[in-house]
């Protein structure tokens, strides 16, 4: 199952659970208790089916999770005619999986952004020439050119007096820091001065 399909399935399940709960409440307020029970059940069944597939897949991989508790809760509530309770559990479960999917997608994007900024090479000044070299080839004492906007690939010592490293990465209030020539400038992985 692709991540995109999984994400869309979670959105659809949340929508169905919410629609079932809200329409059931509307029928209940109108005094149509039989239609309310049908609406609540209709919102629970797709969530319960998807949850059953997820449980079987997880058990096949040797994983046991709390999804079984949610499935038992919904099944027992339906079995005993407590369709409103089943609908609430279905909404809570589908809402939780939606939020989890959202958080995973956001973490995936942030990690991709972070990894795309990691330097893979550096510009080394040696014998009057600038050469692009892999980070593994950098040795203590090498003179590196860090261009404006570059992320420093290593800790180092400033060679020029007018060097002004920015001590923040992707911050609106970033200010250049004038440390002066010869002063050590340690930079952490997020581009901030230590």
Image: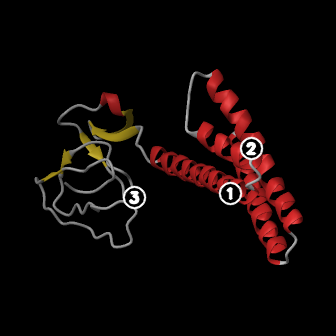
- Which residue is tagged 3? 149
Camera-near label (1 vs 2) is 1
First reached walking from the N terminus: tag 1 or tag 3: 1
Label 2, on which residue?
A: 48
Residue drawn at the location 88% of the way across and 63% of the way down: 34
Q: Position of residue 60 (x, y in %)?
A: 65, 21
The quadrant the N terminus occupies is top right
10 Å neighbourhood of mark 1: few (<14), some, or many (≥20)?
some
Q: Residues within 10 Å of mark 2 (few under 14, many from 20)?
A: many
Which of the 4 image quadrants contains residue 68?
top right
Q: Quadrant of residue 191?
A: bottom left
Whether residue 183 is visible here, answered yes or no, is yes
* Label located before the other in sequence (2 or 3): 2
Q: Residue furthest front?
A: 80
Instruction: Determine whether, in the image, residue 147 is placed left or right of residue 105.
Output: left
User: Looking at the picture, does residue 37 appear above or below residue 159?
Assistant: below
What residue is drawn where x is 17% and y is 36%?
A: 141
Marks 1 and 2 sit apart, C-alpha to C-alpha, by: 13 Å
Q: In this image, 194 relative to 60: left or right?
A: left
Considering only order in the chain, which callout, 2 or 1, is on the residue closer to the N terminus?
2
In the picture, the disc for residue 85 is 1
In the structure shown, which secondary structural element does the residue marked by tag 2 occupy?
A: helix
Identify which residue, 66 or 119, lies in the foreground. 66
Q: Determine whether label 1 and label 2 are within 8 Å by CB.
A: no
């Amino acid at each position: 199952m692709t991540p995109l399909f999984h994400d869309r399935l979670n959105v659809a399940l949340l929508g169905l659970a919410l629609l079932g709960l809200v329409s059931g409440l509307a029928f209940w307020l109108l005094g149509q208790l039989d239609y309310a029970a049908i609406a609540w059940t209709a919102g629970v069944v797709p969530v319960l089916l998807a949850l059953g597939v997820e449980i079987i897949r997880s058990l096949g991989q040797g994983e046991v999770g709390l999804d079984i508790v949610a499935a038992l809760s919904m099944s027992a509530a339906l079995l005993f005619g407590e369709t409103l309770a089943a609908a609430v559990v279905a909404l809570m479960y589908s809402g939780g999986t939606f939020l989890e999917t959202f958080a995973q997608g956001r973490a995936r994007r942030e990690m991709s952004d972070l990894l795309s900024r990691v330097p893979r090479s550096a510009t080394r000044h040696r014998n009057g020439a600038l050469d692009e070299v892999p980070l593994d080839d950098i040795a203590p004492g090498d003179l590196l050119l860090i261009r404006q906007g570059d992320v420093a690939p290593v800790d180092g010592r400033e060679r020029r007096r007018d060097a002004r490293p920015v001590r923040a990465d992707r911050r609106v209030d970033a200010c250049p820091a004038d440390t002066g020539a010869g002063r050590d400038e340690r930079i952490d992985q997020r581009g901030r001065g230590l």
